[in-house]
Image (tube, helix red, strand yellow):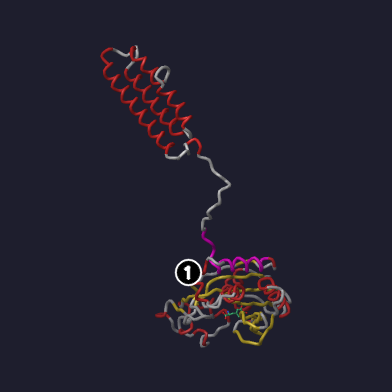
Amino acid sequence: MMALSDFVAELDQLAAQAQEAFDAASSQETLEAARIEFLGAKSGRLKAIQKQMGKVDKADKPAAGKRLNEVKQAIEETFTEASERLASGDTAGSSDVVFDTSLPGTSLAFGRLHPISQTIDELMDIMGRLGFSAAEGPEIEDDWHNFEALNIPREHPARDPLDNFYLSTAKQNANAPDDVLLLRSQTSTVQIRVMSKTPPPIRIISLGRVYRPDTADATHYPMFHQMEGLLIDKQVTMADLKSVLRLFATSYLGSEVHIRFRPSFFPFTEPSVEADFSWNDNWIEFGGAGMVDPNVLKAVGYDPDEVTGFAFGLGVERLCMRRHGVSDIREFYKNDVRFLQQF
Ligand code: DAH
């Protein structure tokens, strides 16, 4: 005897296998062979199941017969579909789906790092080879790190509210400078943060954003990036500063680059210079530098008779613009993908 449920299960399994075989066929010949295997009148597999109907209980026979007809019809339909597919010229049977490595590829557009991020990575790399390690500081700073410890006294014009993004203007008065918070206007703040925590010798760079309320034009933007450098040791001289900056400039811009110092003034360096790099017969100013002022060394608890050092602060956008021939700083912050894709 055979239970009706077993009979039905065999039929369903056969229908699934037939569908698979017909779908896989990639020519009329293979399809015909599959048809004979499943639907063949004499020894087809459906026929074999049909023969088992004799073993099904008499009472279940009508149900079994009904199911047999349904499955037969379903298998015939999938055969017709496969036959039509082949007739229409679609010979890609599912068993033939292969990856053709000789076909031309279509490239996918991946994202990329922003040109300024790429520049920062490269600058860190160059300075890393010169023995400088990267340090970081917060973008929201207090009076001490942005001004006081950098030898910028209370009445100094660099503290002008028109030149700084103060965050707590209500508290801004000469009696409570400790409460003043601002978006840092220079990365020189990181010099103080590092020296306050670490004894000499020091050899660091710090790359990050600074903020100044400038009106945006081709060369100004209210937020930009600086690379701050600081080296403190025994008997450091201006010659060391110039050598490091020359090595840096030639690594980043090419071996034809020359470097020149012009006398300048910064409260935190003495003497102070503007550093210019030559480029295609032009001298271009890249930032400030100098020997760290003894007052700064004292503010962080160093002994100016024991150690000296140099510092510099260069504009990252300016370097990147030179290198890549970008003439307007605003291009970096428009987020126009047609511009950004070029880097
Ligand atoms: N902090 C200065 C600025 O933003 C640049 C600068 C000048 C940094 C001289 C230095 C330095 O470290 O020694 O304009």
Q: Which residues are magenta?
A: 110-128
Q: Nearer the viewer, residue 109 or 313?
A: 109
Residue 146 location (% of width, % of height): 53, 78
- Quadrant where the N terminus is found in the figure: top left
Q: Is residue 2 left or right of residue 101?
A: left
Residue 273 location (% of width, % of height): 65, 84
**Picture quadrant where residue 271 is located:** bottom right
Q: Which amino acid is tagged 1?
A: Asp
Viewer can see residue 245: yes
Residue 119 lies within the magenta run = yes
Q: Is residue 115 left or right of residue 37?
A: right
Local packing at callout 1 (Cα closer than 10 Å; few below 14, some 14-19, many 20+) is few
Q: Is mark 1 within 8 Å of ligand 1?
A: no
**Picture quadrant where residue 34 is located:** top left
Residue 213 location (% of width, % of height): 47, 81
**Quarter of the render that holds ligand 1:** bottom right
Q: Is residue 168 left or right of residue 321?
A: left
Q: Secondary structure at mark 1?
A: loop
Q: Nearer the viewer, residue 32 or 168?
A: 32
In the depicted structure, whether residue 82 falls above or below residue 61: below
Q: Residue at x 49, y 66 (%)?
A: 337
Report the number of discs: 1
Viewer can see residue 174: no
- Quadrant where the C terminus is found in the figure: bottom right
In the depicted structure, whether residue 137 falls above or below residue 56: below
SS majority, magenta: helix
Q: Nearer the viewer, residue 279 or 247?
A: 279
Q: Residue at x 51, y 69 (%)?
A: 339
Residue 238 location (% of width, % of height): 71, 80
Residue tagged 1: 336
